[in-house]
Each structure stands twice: as structure tokens, then as C-alpha cells.
Image: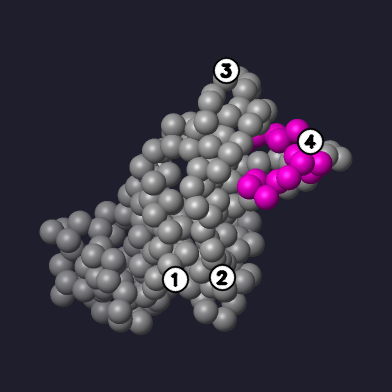
Amino acid sequence: MQIQLQAAYILHARPYRETSLLLDILTPDYGRIHAVAKGAKRKSIGLLQPFIPLRLSWSGKRELKTLTSFESGGASQFLVSEWLYSAFYLNEILVRVLRCDDPHPNLFYFYESAIGNLSNQHALSPILREFEKHCLAEIGYALPLHKAKIDPEKNYYYDAHQGFSVISSPENFNQQTCFSGGVLHAIADNIYTDKIVGLAAKRLMRMALKPHLGDRPLQSRQFFSKSMLI
């Protein structure tokens, strides 16, 4: 199978043998693919790195494809500081939760938009939380944040497998697993101006993503030991 000039982003790259690179790549039409760039370490590989829009060509029917050509797909994004670390976090999530060769075209464009917003140094919480929600929805596990079904005056327990359940009595409210309806409404609207909402949203997304990420810690979280955004 020959694929020509597919839009793509590199999610992760690592050395392979003496002269090649193994790449995790996000594409709109083929999802996440795993490819080898043979001899790439001998060539100019400035383009084969994360956060650069690319046009890639590859061949192969098995899970490991062979990259045959690559070129720029647009202007490079300039990322610094916590915006750069946030972008690595998005990449790590996608590598961990997406199966190979499972297309998610909407998620590709959500990712592209998120990288653009990070490059422009927009507020981090809305970017990260909205992307996490989109990611969960795309893999079939959308958060049930239906405002019509959540009373802002009540409190709710969250379970990653069963969703939200009303808490009948205040003494059963656990700060780690429970959320007020008002906070859930703000999360549904992606409004994080209130610090309490931002912290609750981060906690909720961690709980929702955990079954898909597994127990192995995310390396990108090491960069956020102070800001605690992810």
C-alpha cells in the first residue's frame, strides 16, 4: 500500500538501529501510524520532529510502515515553557490511547487547533481540558456532561465506568471523587476562570483518562510538578 502526502504530525520519535528513526505519527485519514524513517539520522531531519505540520508518504501493509518521503505542510509552531510541556502532554496522551490504524479525523483537527492555541500562548486550562474531552469522545468514552441531566444544586459521584450519580447526603461527599453540579456545568461549558473549577476539571479528566492510560505514569507530568495543570 502506497500513501502519498498525507497531512501529519510527529507525536514521538526515537532512534532505531544505527541510522534510522521510529516514529509515532498522527494523520487524519489513517489515525495513529507507526513508521520507520530509514537512514533519517544521516539526512537533514529538521522536519521529523513534533509540532511541525507535515505531508508524509509511506508504504507497507503491516503495523510498521516505511516512510518514503516527507515535506513541510505549513508554518512551524513555536512553543515555549509550559505551552511546550502541554503540547508534549497532548502527544503522550494520543500515543497511549489511540490504536494504530484507527482513523479519527476530527481528533486530528482538534489536535492541530490545540497546538496552534498553545503556540499563541492562550490560557492552558481551556486548551487542555477541551482536548481531553474531545479525545475521550473520539475513542468512544465521552464524559456525560449533559447540563439538562445535571442539577447545579446537587452533588455527584463520578465513576469512570458508570458516569455520574447523585449523592443523596452531604456526608457522602468525597473531595477526590465527587463534584458539585455547578462545577460540572462550568466544565461542560469549558469555563475555567474559577480556580476551583480548574482543579476539579483536572481531577475529573485524570479519573476519566486513567482506564485508557494505564498505571504507567505520564512522563510529561514531570514537567508540571509546580503548576499541576495536568
Query: How many angstroms separate mark 1 from mark 2 (CA)?
Result: 9 Å
Which marked residue is nearer to the observer: mark 2 or mark 3? 2
Disc 4 to disc 2, C-alpha distance: 29 Å
Residue 31 location (% of width, % of height): 48, 36
> On the image, numbered disc 1 is attached to which residue?
121
What mark, if any, has residue 1 been given in the picture?
A: 3
The residues tagged by marks 4 and 1 sit, at their Cα atoms, a distance apart of 35 Å
The residue carrying mark 2 is 80
Dot 3: what SS? Answer: loop
Please say whether residue 167 is visible from this viewpoint: no
Q: Position of residue 169 (x, y in %)?
A: 24, 75
Q: Amino acid at mark 1?
A: Gln
Is residue 170 positioned above or below 96 on the image?
below
Q: Amino acid at mark 3?
A: Met
Camera-side mark, 3 or 4: 4
Dot 2 amino acid type: Val
Question: Which label number is shown at residue 39?
Answer: 4
Q: Are marks 3 and 1 in contact (CB under 8 Å)?
A: no
| Disc 4 residue type (three-letter) | Gly
Q: Is residue 55 visible?
A: yes
- The crowd level at tag 3 (other Cα within 10 Å; few <14, some 14-19, many 20+) is few
Residue 1, horizontal then vertical, whole percent: 57, 17
Residue at mark 3 to residue at mark 1: CA–CA distance: 40 Å
The answer to whether the residues at label 1 and label 2 have Cβ atoms under 8 Å apart is yes
Q: Earlier in the sequence, mark 4 or mark 2?
A: 4
Q: Is residue 38 left or right of residue 129?
A: right
Discs 2, 3 touching: Cβ within 8 Å: no
Q: What residue range appears in magenta?
A: 32-48
